[in-house]
Image (tube, helix red, strand yellow):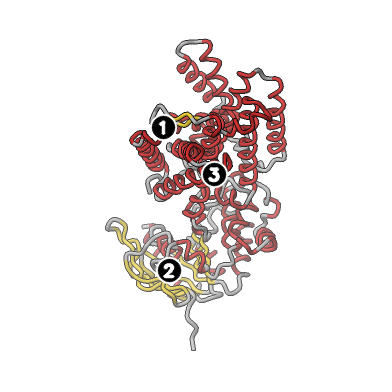
Amino acid sequence: MVAEPLLRVERVSKSFDGVRALDGVSLAVRAGEVLGIIGPNGAGKSTLAGIVAGWIAPSSGRVLLGGKEITALPVRMRALLGIAATHQTPRVFTSLTVQENIELAAGKRGEDMIREVAEKLDLTSKLHQRASSLSFGHRRLLELAMALASSPRLLVLDEPSQGLSTEETGRLESVIMGLRDVGVLLIDHRVDFVSRISNSVAVMNSGRVIALGRPREEAVSAAIKRAYLREET
Amino acid sequence: MAGRSRYSVGTPVLSAIVITALALLYTLLPDYGRTLLARIMVLSIYSYGFAVSFHLLGVMSLGHAALFASGMYGAGLYALRSPVGGPPAALAAGLASSLIVSVILCLVTLRTRGPYTMIATLLLSQALYLLMLHFNEVTGGEQGIVLPRQATVAWQLEGVLGEAGSRYFIALAGLTAAVLSVLLLQRSRLGRILLALRDDEDKLESLGYDRRLYRFIGFSVSGLLSGLSGSLYALTYGYMGAGFAGVMYSVQPILWVLVGGPVIELSPFIGCLAVGILSDLASGLVRGHVLVVGLGLVAIAFATRRLVWMSRLLGRLEGVGR
């Protein structure tokens, strides 16, 4: 018997003022799996992330978490069900210190959790620094640390490698690959980065999934070329 | 300022020094100075109430006078009409009525942000003001009601401290309670959640926090402090009037906080003190003292870049109108 996927997106569409950003997208993410979403600008990747995280309401279609429909659930309820998300532009609480930011996300999970995620993302030396004084890259890592500290079942990462140095990207890779039993919806425009750490990849273009398969699979590679070349021309 | 921790040991120590200095100052001041400072201390509790809303929640309310006046009338009317419990019961009645009004104010403004919150709070406080004028047989309207001396807390302690002394030390006790509340709140988990709420409500919600609940709690704390100030005013000065619910009394704490600056533990008092003393000095020197005070405050605001600080804080209220 095949287990129910952790996340199931069924025929989801979204229009903004008549412009179709997503057109009947269906996807599934299993626990412990990283599903990479690749596509050029305007492909609908971030809209998809927003719909899964609850920031955007779909025009039609369904979103299910662990078999339970969450399409109409507000962001807060999704967070309580175990969905954690990071934004394309990192959002952290700038008046608070790094430690306080992680503490708020960790809730009652305690000191050990804070230390563990801070160590993983090399934020230990910055724990007592105000988030407002962090660089863009460190804010991104802090937002990821907050997401991890909430012990999520599903992690939605929107362009997590953007603005990170090579070293930081490497650390991000090892953190994502080291996650156990957490489903990851990874949205990024860096094909090599996504291909390295994803179990499967969905290629999106003009609001549709045009290919779905293992990274470097022939059909996937061809779809990536088609999507990106179209953007260049 | 960016990388500095909010919890410097200096602020509680400085707060303790200021409170002690105020207690000692009583022996040095003439009667007029004692009365003036007692009034400033009572009003600065109101300033703390506004500061909790502004500094911690990022809510710029233009209706805080409703909270102050409801505390004042709650305590005053209780002291006037009920013989049970004395001043402590009157104080509790004042706090309860300001809490009820703050709950109403909060419920109405829960879905608003930025300028819409300002408009909603202003309208609500004006509604309360008009109600107070309408029911002037109960409230005394603009003329207000003078409480019999026996109903005031100042009278109860007069035998021990004298009239000026009892007013002064009741005001100081209230101010100490306000400073302590703010110190504890800012260092508590609740305080951090309120700051996070001010920074980014949507992000806080995405971590599983109920932004409405926390805004509600924060606003209630703010209402209680404002109500404490109003109650103490009624119980120490023996007077309550509908004028205290007017728009002028909503604008004043904004001015105090603007002049006082960004340190929430002390700035509400410092701002209130500076404006109070400036007003008092100017009123004795020149005829159009309001204009002089106004110009003085504008000068202070520009010289200390307070307007920049305030607009930055308000600029964080993203998604205006959502």
Residue at 44% from the left image edge and 70% from the top image edge? A202
Mark 2 residue crowding within 10 angstroms, few (<14) / some (14–19) / many (20+): many
- Asked whether the residues under marks 3 and 2 belong to the same chain, the reply is no
Return the residue nearer the eye: B248 or B293: B248
Would you place residue A143 above or below residue B285 in this image?
A: below
Residue B55 visible from this viewpoint: no
Return the residue nearer the eye: B122 or B229: B229
- Which numbered dot is residue B84? 3
Would you place residue A135 above or below residue B128 in this image?
A: below
Q: Dividing the picture into quarters, in which one does residue A9 lie?
A: bottom left
From mark 1 to mark 2, how far is it between C-alphas? Answer: 67 Å
Residue A122 visible from this viewpoint: yes
- Which numbered dot is residue A203? 2
Q: Dividing the picture into quarters, in which one does residue A26 lie?
A: bottom left
Mark 1 residue crowding within 10 angstroms, few (<14) / some (14–19) / many (20+): many
Q: Nearer the viewer, mark 1 or mark 3?
A: 3
Q: Quadrant of the C terminus of chain A?
A: bottom left
From mark 1 to mark 3, how far is it between C-alphas? Answer: 25 Å
Type of the residue with mark 1: Ala
- Please state the horizontal and vertical placement of residue A164, each as a whole percent of the image: 58, 54
- Which numbered dot is residue B300? none
- Asked whether the residues under marks 1 and 2 belong to the same chain, the reply is no
Type of the residue with mark 2: Val
Type of the residue with mark 3: Val
Q: Nearer the viewer, mark 3 or mark 2?
A: 3
Q: Which residue is the site of mark 1? A: B242
